[in-house]
């Protein structure tokens, strides 16, 4: 990927089946990233990529996928560390 965007792999129901009007990512520095979902599949399964623009900087520790303004769907840890339960 170029330095102006990044891609994450994703699987599940296709993006057209998500019940959200807005979807974006935000990092630990409160930088917001536009999302573009592209892939193949149908209602039961979908495999594709979530493209982020601009690309998060190397020092960003995590990314949250946000829906409809305030709903955090998931957090991606970019540090590579694992926490014990």
Image (tube, grey):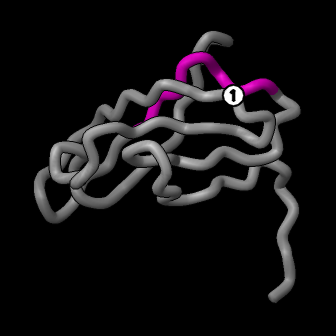
11 sits to left or right of 77: left
Residue 32: quadrant of the picture:
top right
Give 55 or 11, whichever is nearer the viewer: 55
Q: Residue at x 34, y 34 (%)?
A: 37
Query: Which residue is the site of mark 1?
Result: 31
Residue at 74% across, 47% down: 62
Q: Is residue 44 above or below residue 53?
A: below
Looking at the rendering, the stretch of residues picked out in magenta corresponds to 49-57
- Which quadrant is home to the N terminus? top right
Front one among 56 and 49: 56
Instruction: Name which residue lies at 39% across and 39% down.
Output: 23
Seen as rendered, the residue at the extreme bottom is 85
Secondary structure under the numbered disc 1 in the rendered image: loop
Quadrant for the C terminus in the image: bottom right
Residue situated in front as seen by the camera: 63 or 13:
63
Decide whether residue 78 is among the magenta residues.
no
| Relative image position of residue 75 (x, y in whole percent) | 62, 57
Q: Nearer the viewer, residue 9 or 73?
A: 73
**In the displayed structure image, the side of residue 27 where residue 2 appears, left or right:** left
Residue at the (30%, 60%) spot, across then down: 12
**What is the number of callouts on the image?**
1
Q: Indicate left or right for 72 with 58 as reference.
A: left
- Seen in the picture, residue 85 relative to 64 is either above or below; the reply is below
Instruction: Please state if 16 lies on the left or on the right of 26 as rendered.
Output: left
Determine crowd level at label 1: few under 14, some 14-19, many 20+ residues with C-alpha closer than 10 A: few
| Residue 33 % position (x, y) | 56, 27
């Amino acid at each position: 990927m170029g330095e102006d965007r990044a891609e994450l792999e994703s699987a599940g129901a296709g993006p057209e089946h998500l019940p959200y009007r807005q979807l974006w990512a935000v990092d630990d520095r409160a930088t917001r990233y536009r999302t573009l979902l592209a892939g193949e599949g149908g209602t039961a399964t979908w495999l594709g990529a979530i493209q982020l623009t601009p690309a998060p900087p190397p020092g960003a520790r995590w990314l949250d996928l946000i829906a409809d303004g305030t709903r955090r769907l998931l957090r991606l840890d970019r540090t590579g560390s694992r926490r014990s339960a």
